[in-house]
Image (cartoon, rainbow, N blue to C red):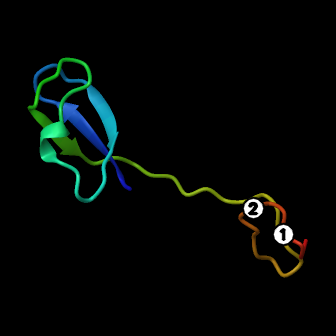
């Protein structure tokens, strides 16, 4: 399920919501003031990387790769 960032147009609170594809829109309310006047905003994202590498140069996502 994707995480979306919203900002309340009444109080200015910025918050994240984890929403399923089929979730009801009426659940979209500000966590601070309860307003339904919220707007989806662009948010950044991060891509992590593993510090363990194998002998062939790839990475092992679990960190317990038998090849390293």
* Along the viewing direction, whichever of 40 and 2 lies nearer the viewer: 2
Give the x, y percent position of residue 65: 84, 69
**Vertically, is 43 above or below 67?**
above
| Few, some or many residues within 10 Å of mark 2 (<14, 14–19, 20+) | few
Q: What residue do we see at 30% from left, 42% from top?
A: 5
**Vertically, is 17 above or below 68?**
above
**Vertically, is 13 above or below 44?**
above
Give the x, y percent position of residue 20: 30, 54
**Vertically, is 56 above or below 27?**
below
| Few, some or many residues within 10 Å of mark 1 (<14, 14–19, 20+) | few
Give the x, y percent position of residue 58: 76, 76
Kindly identify which residue carries mark 2. Answer: 62
Q: What residue do we see at 12% from left, 40% from top?
A: 26
Q: Is residue 32 left or right of residue 59?
A: left
Kindly identify which residue carries mark 1. Answer: 65
Q: Is residue 67 left or right of residue 22?
A: right
Q: Is residue 38 left or right of residue 61?
A: left
Q: What residue do we see at 18% from left, 17% from top?
A: 33
Give the x, y percent position of residue 10: 10, 22
* Pointers 2 and 1 in contact (C-beta within 8 Å): yes
Mark 1: secondary structure: loop
Q: CA distance from mark 2 to mark 1?
A: 7 Å
Q: Quadrant of the C terminus?
A: bottom right
Q: Quadrant of the N terminus?
A: bottom left
Mark 2: secondary structure: loop
């Amino acid at each position: 399920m994707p995480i979306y960032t919203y900002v309340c147009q009444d109080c200015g609170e910025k918050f994240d919501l984890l929403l399923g594809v089929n979730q009801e829109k009426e659940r979209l309310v500000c966590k601070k003031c309860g307003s339904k006047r919220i707007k989806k905003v662009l948010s950044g994202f991060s891509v992590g990387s593993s510090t363990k590498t194998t002998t062939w140069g790839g990475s092992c996502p679990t960190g317990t790769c038998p090849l390293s």
